[in-house]
Amino acid sequence: MTTAAVQRTYDPIELSSEAFWSKTARERDESFATLRQDRPVSWQPPAYGSLMPVDDDPGYWAVVRHADVVAVSKQNAIFSSAPELGGVMFENAPAELLRASQSILTMDEPEHGITRRILSKAFSPRQVRQIEQQINAQATAIVDDFLAEGPRDFVEQVSMRLPLWTISEMLGVPAEDREQLVRAVDDMVGYNDPEYIGDRNPFMCVFEGMTSLHQIGERLITARRAEPGEDLMSALVNAEVDGQRLTDEELKSYFCLLAVAGNDTTRNTTSHGAKALFDHPEQKQALIDDFDRLIGPAVEEFLRWGTPVMTFRRTAKEDVVLGGQQIAAGDKVVMFYSSANRDEQVFVDPWRFDITRNPNPHVAFGGGGVHFCLGSHVARMQMKALFRELLTRAPELQFGEPEYVAGHFMHAIKRLPCTG
């Protein structure tokens, strides 16, 4: 912590309180819009709901403009993700927890590049083809069940099922472990939501979720070492680059990351995208009429519109100027993706839902650089397959108002009532 950091004055528009994050996305963007225009990098008080309270935490720099989010993302030599410097969570969290649950997200170079190459080795063309076949079959089966049961809650019946099924099939998670996996992911993401926390504190909520995922991962690793199969975990266990393989602890951490990122991001983008699409009948009809041409740009708009991951942090490793502000070495920097994806300087009429938007340089998968989402192609496959089924077989769906998960990390929808 620097002396300069202690003496700074917090911006009058604050982005850290529970009250701010209890507002709607549109209401929050009123604050973001003012900051984007006048103070794109502002000094803010510590975020509420810390997993590890720090008495002398001075606060953080809020980065709300698209260009600055991209700049931070691409300058990984300056802006660190390392757990010992704070990792990527908006609030403070123990380095051990971050290292055990977020894998390559909390690695700087050269460790990040080495680990990413090993992980990429497991995504062979054959593996990707197999994943795509599974996704198409799963999307059909999910909509079969949805229509047979009758539309009720889109999250429970549709959007949570495909990513869970896909990740489970990809990794070889047995059916008897899948309910435990869902509960664990909810704990990892919903640690600021009273419904998920219960009588625990936020740290215990996350810790128990992580421990549960490690248990599932450890069983899988042991089983695949003894008897490799055709799934991704078998490929990960045996993936090797320059004689290096992932350790069991690294594999469990990556399993944790895949379970959370592979489930929750796609689940919520699907929910946000479906709600927006069916609320804009002219957009829905255009996609029905020309699905193969428009589904690609439509998925990109779903991602921009929903922005499932709202915040990530970095820590400055050296003094640097960003958005006209002098950032000191050791300062915490938080990127607000939901603000960047509504930046008027980049997106014409950003609150217009437009499946033909072009260009659409959203930052839903990160702002570029070495940490760009490794599973982005799988998420796109899932949404293309699922919306093909929905628009072909359930084009008259109607949606009620979503119920959101409390918090400042994921733009998560708990429940989304539907009829049709």
Image (cartoon, rainbow, N blue to C red):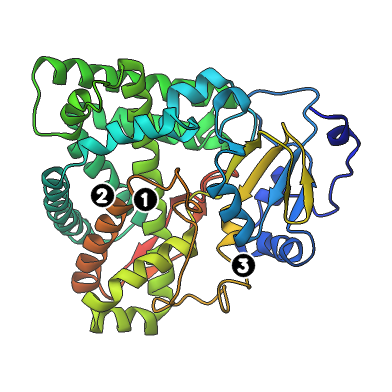
Tell me if 245 is positioned left or right of 66 in this view: left
**Which one is closest to the eye, mark 3 or mark 2?**
3
Image coordinates of residue 191 in percent, x first then y, are 54, 33
Which residue is depicted at the point 67% across and 59% down? 28
Residue hosting label 3: 343
Residue 262 location, quadrant: top left
Residue hosting label 1: 267
Which residue is depicted at the point 22% across and 36% down? 121
Q: Is residue 85 above or below residue 396?
A: above
In space, the residues marked 3 and 2 are separated at their CA atoms by 31 Å
Q: Amino acid at mark 3?
A: Asp
Mark found first going from the N terminus, 1 or 2 = 2
Residue hosting label 2: 162
Quadrant including the N terminus: top right
Q: Is residue 199 visible?
A: no
Q: Amino acid at mark 1?
A: Arg
